[in-house]
Amino acid sequence: MVYCNITNEEMFDGWYNDNTGEYFKYEKDYLNHIDKIIEETLIWHNVDLKDKDAMKKVFLKEEQVELPISVDDRLEYAYNHLGCYWSEWLEDEEE
């Protein structure tokens, strides 16, 4: 059985982070997770999070991709660079 790491709700589909082993039932929680990873990346590179231009430049230089802003860009970035993806799971037949 798979449970959301945020809500502890049972899941049969949703997002999964292969690097952390976390499951997300709701897109808003998954996007928050992606945003935290992006923020941690910027902090790691000593970027002032209030300076949007510096954020874009450093992210492009260090990550070699543009800073993902839109929902679609963040989902694509997570898929391509963070080991995150949407999937479906079957109910465990033993339960």
Image (cartoon, grey):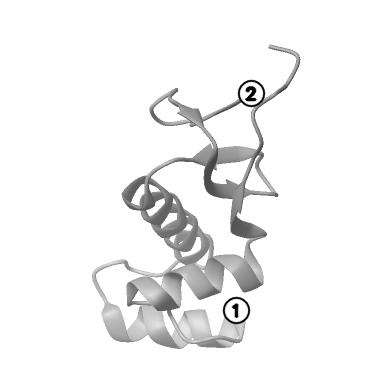
Residue placed most toward the observer, 13 or 15: 13
Q: Earlier in the sequence, mark 1 or mark 2?
A: 2
Q: Is residue 64 left or right of residue 72?
A: right
Identify whether 43 is placed above or below 58.
above
Badge number at residue 63? 1
Instruction: Compare residues 33 and 44 and report the one nearer the observer.
Output: 33
Q: From this viewpoint, which residue is outermost toward the top?
A: 95
The amino acid pointed to by label 2 is: Met
User: Taking 12 as reference, is 62 above or below it?
Assistant: below
The residue at 48%/56% (across/down) is 40
**In this picture, is 43 found above or below 11?**
below
- Where residue 68 appears, as percent x and y from the top left, is 42, 77
> Which residue: 34% across, 77% down?
69
- Compute the Cα span from label 1 to label 2: 35 Å
**48 left or right of 85 in image:** left
Quarter the C terminus occupies: top right
The residue carrying mark 2 is 1
Q: Residue 57: x and y, percent?
A: 44, 88
Q: Are marks 1 and 2 in contact (CB under 8 Å)?
A: no
**Residue at x 41%, y 31% (from the top left corner):** 6
Q: Quadrant of residue 31?
A: bottom left
Say which mark, if any, is on residue 11: none
On-image quarter of the N terminus = top right
Callout count: 2
